[in-house]
Amino acid sequence: MNGVQRETVTQEKITNGLPLESSHLNVDLNLEHRQKGLLWYSTYKVGFDGTIHFVIRAAKTRQSISL
């Protein structure tokens, strides 16, 4: 239109599963009871740490990535 160029930007979200090779997970779970009025509630403090390892296999190359 009248020598004006337009650029359109689109975003596409692609979700693919990765083959999980191994994992090492640490979870620290602490139970605390709290009272509100006459009622008692169970509350939890959670600590989480972990390492996962997966391998991306391309057509001709093999890459290993640890997170």
Image (cartoon, grey):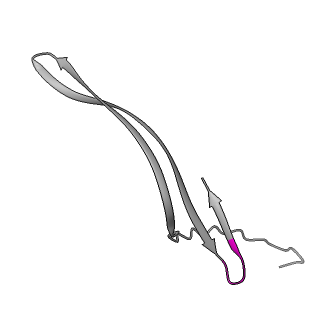
What residue sits 86% from the left and 73% below the top? 4
- Furthest residue toward top: 37
Based on the picture, tell me whether residue 43 belongs to the magenta stretch.
Answer: no
What residue sits 56% from the left and 59% below the top? 53
**Where is residue 42, by image quadrant?**
top left
Question: Residue 52 or 43: which is nearer the viewer?
Answer: 52
What residue sits 68% from the left and 84% below the top? 59
Image quarter in which the N terminus is found = bottom right
Above or below, 2 relative to 24:
below
Q: Is residue 47 left or right of residue 53?
A: left
Q: Is residue 27 left or right of residue 10?
A: left
- Furthest residue toward right: 3
x and y percentages locating residue 50 in the rendered image: 49, 46
Q: How many marks?
A: 0
x and y percentages locating residue 5 in the rendered image: 85, 74
**Where is residue 55, by image quadrant?**
bottom right
- Furthest residue toward left: 38
x and y percentages locating residue 28 in the rendered image: 37, 34
Residues rendered magenta in the picture: 58-62
For the stretch drawn in magenta, what is the main secondary structure?
Answer: loop
Question: Residue 54 or 13: which is nearer the viewer?
Answer: 54
